[in-house]
Amino acid sequence: MAPVPSLRKSSRARHSLGVAMLGGNPKLKRKDHDFYATLDDVFLAVYPILDLGPDVHEFCCGDGAICKLLEERGHNVVATDLHDRGWGTPGRDALAMEGLSAPDLVTNPPFNIAPRLIEHIMPMRPRVFALLLKSTFWHAKSRMATFRRYPPSGVYALSWRPDFEKLDRPTLEMSWVVWDSRRTGPTVYDVLERPAGYAEAERVERAARREARKLAELAAAAVAGPGAPARRARRPRPRLQLV
């Protein structure tokens, strides 16, 4: 009688499954300091909803992606970051802020400090406070107290998955979480449409990257010569479906 295969997964396999279910890619290492530059369409989708004032603080400014879009629209931007990525004033820890540099704050924070940012900044009573977070951010018992203490004015889910790393297989589902002191009532949930033109531009970019990869493979095969072993075709893996 043939042995029955074990259904138990290794700890590594369980970790990979968990990462995939949470919208990540288990094969990719996380960026240093969780830095994923904000794509233009990700911010422009929520910008009309924010109704920002003239002065805005971008306190995890990174390479200035959000700052540039704000400045193009006439805002005065205070740009700071703990790390030097070529934009704004480095060496400023958002978790050490003792007061507001502007009434409105907008950023795409490192995922690993987002809960502490909310607890640190909300007592300062910003007029508008907007964070780009994973859509599953509030799906945790450990964050229920924060949600009850500082209920957002709105949670605005992106209707597409941003391809932060240009790998053509985005898995992260993202939402903007917004606190607006001018609004009252329960938290609003809505879905944001992608700004016009960006989906088509992304399709063109992906096609160009695929073509570049094919040409690189052909060039590598030509250099290797006819005696080189052929690359084994990768077997397709079954796609995970959540029911």
Image (cartoon, grey):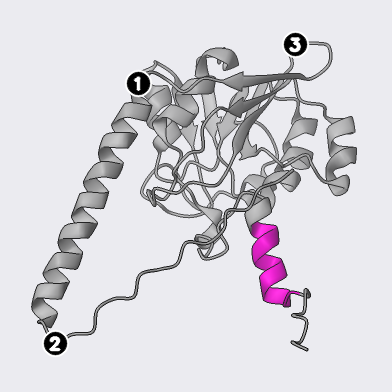
Q: Secondary structure at mark 3?
A: loop
Quote the CA–CA distance across marks 3 and 2. 70 Å
Q: Nearer the viewer, mark 3 or mark 2?
A: 2
* Drawn side of residue 224 relative to residue 11, left or right: left
Q: Which residues are magenta?
A: 9-19
Quote the CA–CA distance across marks 1 and 3. 26 Å
Q: Nearer the viewer, residue 92 or 28?
A: 28
The quarter of the picture where the N terminus appears is bottom right
Q: Is residue 11 magenta?
A: yes
- Are dots 1 and 3 in contact, CB under 8 Å? no
Mark 3 crowd level (few <14, some 14–19, many ≥20, 10 Å Cα): few
Going 17% across and 63% down the picture, which residue do you hit?
Answer: 216
Q: Is residue 210 magenta?
A: no
- Which residue is label 2 attached to? 227
Give the vertical position of 7 relative to 67 (above or below).
below
Q: Main secondary structure of the magenta part?
A: helix
- Are dots 3 and 2 in contact, CB under 8 Å? no
- Which residue is label 1 attached to? 72
The amino acid on which the numbered mark 2 sits, given as a three-letter code, is Gly
Q: Secondary structure at mark 1?
A: helix
Residue 21 in the image, given as x and y percentages of width and height: 68, 52
Q: Nearer the viewer, residue 2 or 178?
A: 2
The amino acid on which the numbered mark 3 sits, given as a three-letter code, is Arg
Q: Nearer the viewer, mark 2 or mark 1?
A: 2
Going 79% across and 20% down the picture, which residue do you hit?
Answer: 187
- Which residue is label 3 attached to? 183
Mark 2 crowd level (few <14, some 14–19, many ≥20, 10 Å Cα): few
Q: Nearer the viewer, residue 132 or 227?
A: 227
